[in-house]
Amino acid sequence: MFKLRIVLLASGSGSLAQAIFDAKLNLEILALISDKDSVALRRAERAGVKAIFLPVETSRTEWDKKLFSEVSHLNPDIVVSVGFMRILNKEFVETFRTINTHPALLPNFPGAHAVADALAANATETGTTVHWVDEGVDTGAIIEQVKVAIEPGDTEESLHERIKIKERELIVETLQKFIDSGAR
């Protein structure tokens, strides 16, 4: 059976990464890379996954080169962005097949404030998307989506929590499909 080799990119709490760690998938998780000293790094360490802290200390160009070098050495089949709050440069996304999770039904509500934007627009539904990463902001081809209803009285926090549940399920299901297809 095909074993998918992945690198995770995360900036925050790592709940999406944890869902992947906990899933019984035929994965080789080569590393989790974080640009912040994040909970995601500690989750990776507890799961026995190589944790790489790569802060932006110098210029963004230098950081991009360091990230490219780290991922090149790991040689993944797919890079999985799970709550990574950096835009990846053109060279990176043209070299490494990269997917991302996003807490909205793209192309609606791209960017860092998707949940708040959905509420501000008085949308009746939103959801989560797994998409290919290109050099734009949440503009890559959509792989999978799941809808989440916006309920009366929803706050940004309550809606985001319901989206996160679906987002964790969707990333695991998407990775399983990549494994089943031999990462095509």
Image (tube, rainbow, N blue to C red):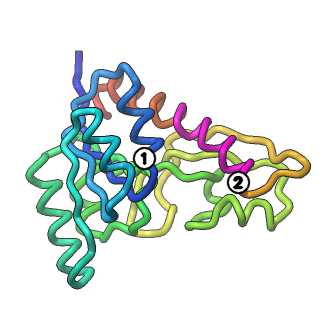
The disc placed on residue 157 is 2
**Amino acid type, residue under disc 2 in the picture:** Glu
Magenta residues span: 157-169
Find residue 133 and report its image quarter: bottom left
Q: Position of residue 30 (x, y in %)?
A: 19, 40
Q: Residue furthest right?
A: 152
Residue 118, placed above or below residue 126: below
Q: Position of residue 182 (x, y in %)?
A: 28, 26
Q: Nearer the viewer, residue 54 or 75?
A: 54
Q: Secondary structure at mark 2?
A: helix
Q: Nearer the viewer, residue 21 or 128?
A: 21
What main secondary structure does the magenta stretch of the protein show?
Answer: helix
Residue 161, placed above or below residue 2: below
Q: Residue at x 23, y 79 (%)?
A: 57
Mark 1 packing: few (<14 Cα in 10 Å), some, or many (20+)? many
For residue 153, side relative to residue 182 (left or right) = right
**Amino acid type, residue under disc 1 in the picture:** Gly
Which image quadrant: the N terminus? top left
Queried whether the magenta region covers residue 160, the answer comes back as yes
The disc placed on residue 143 is none
Mark 2 packing: few (<14 Cα in 10 Å), some, or many (20+)? few
Which image quadrant: the C terminus? top left
Q: Earlier in the sequence, mark 1 or mark 2?
A: 1
Q: Residue furthest bottom?
A: 59
Q: CA distance from mark 1 to mark 2?
A: 17 Å
Q: Residue at x 16, y 71 (%)?
A: 65
Q: Position of residue 134 (x, y in %)?
A: 39, 62
Number of numbered callouts drawn: 2
Q: Which residue is mark 1?
A: 14
